[in-house]
Amino acid sequence: MPGTAELIQRRGNRMKAVLPVRLKGKDSTGKAFEELVHTLDVTASGARIGSVRRELNVDEEVTIFYRQRKMQFRVVWTKKMKGTSEFQVGLRATTQDKEAWGLALPPQNTQATQSPLSPAPALA
């Protein structure tokens, strides 16, 4: 069982959704990149993405392209996957788009919930 330091607050309920997306931004070295990744789950205000092959800085802004949509996010946390060179990344939307993913998402909580399944934000 993770310690309380690993609990983070989430504004909405997650919906498992593996969607192919294009991620664009700057990596931890400041180099611009664009690569194909996928979501693991989404909420009305964020997403968890996988198959990211570059290390990203927390608080860095990135752009996600999905179908005809272009969405702005801020990196909330990153986690290097053991045994691979890939990362999972938690993103929070910088703008609110009611139909961002084009899915019927569960309603957003008015109170934040805690989840022991989310990695804690990276500490410097």
Image (cartoon, rainbow, N blue to C red):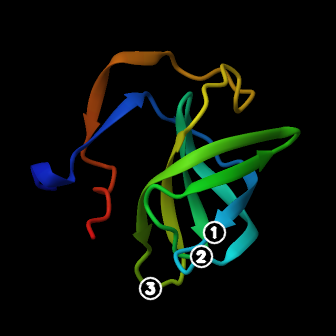
| 59 relative position to 110: left or right | right
- Residue 115 position in % (x across, y down): 28, 40
Camera sees residue 76: yes
- Indicate the secondary structure of the residue bearing disc 1: strand
- Closest to the camera, between mark 3 and mark 2, is 2
Classify residue 34 by image quadrant: bottom right
| 89 relative position to 24: left or right | left
**Residue position for label 2:** 30
Q: Residue at x 39, y 28 (%)?
A: 11
Residue nearest the observer in this picture, 101 or 73: 73
Question: How far apart are labels 3 and 2 at the CA level?
Answer: 25 Å
Classify residue 25 by image quadrant: bottom right
Q: In the rendered structure, which disc, 1 or 3, sits on the residue that comes first in sequence? A: 1
Q: Residue at x 57, y 37 (%)?
A: 94
**Residue position for label 3:** 83
Q: As shown in the figure, which amino acid type bears the numbered disc 3?
A: Gly
Q: As shown in the figure, which amino acid type bears the numbered disc 1?
A: Lys
**Residue position for label 1:** 26
- Indicate the secondary structure of the residue bearing disc 3: loop
Classify residue 95 by image quadrant: top right
Q: As shown in the figure, which amino acid type bears the numbered disc 2?
A: Gly
Mark carried by residue 36 = none
- Residue 65 position in % (x across, y down): 78, 48
- Indicate the secondary structure of the residue bearing disc 2: loop
Q: In the rendered structure, which disc, 3 or 2, sits on the residue that comes first in sequence? A: 2
- Residue 26 position in % (x across, y down): 63, 68
Question: How far apart are labels 1 and 2 at the CA level?
Answer: 5 Å
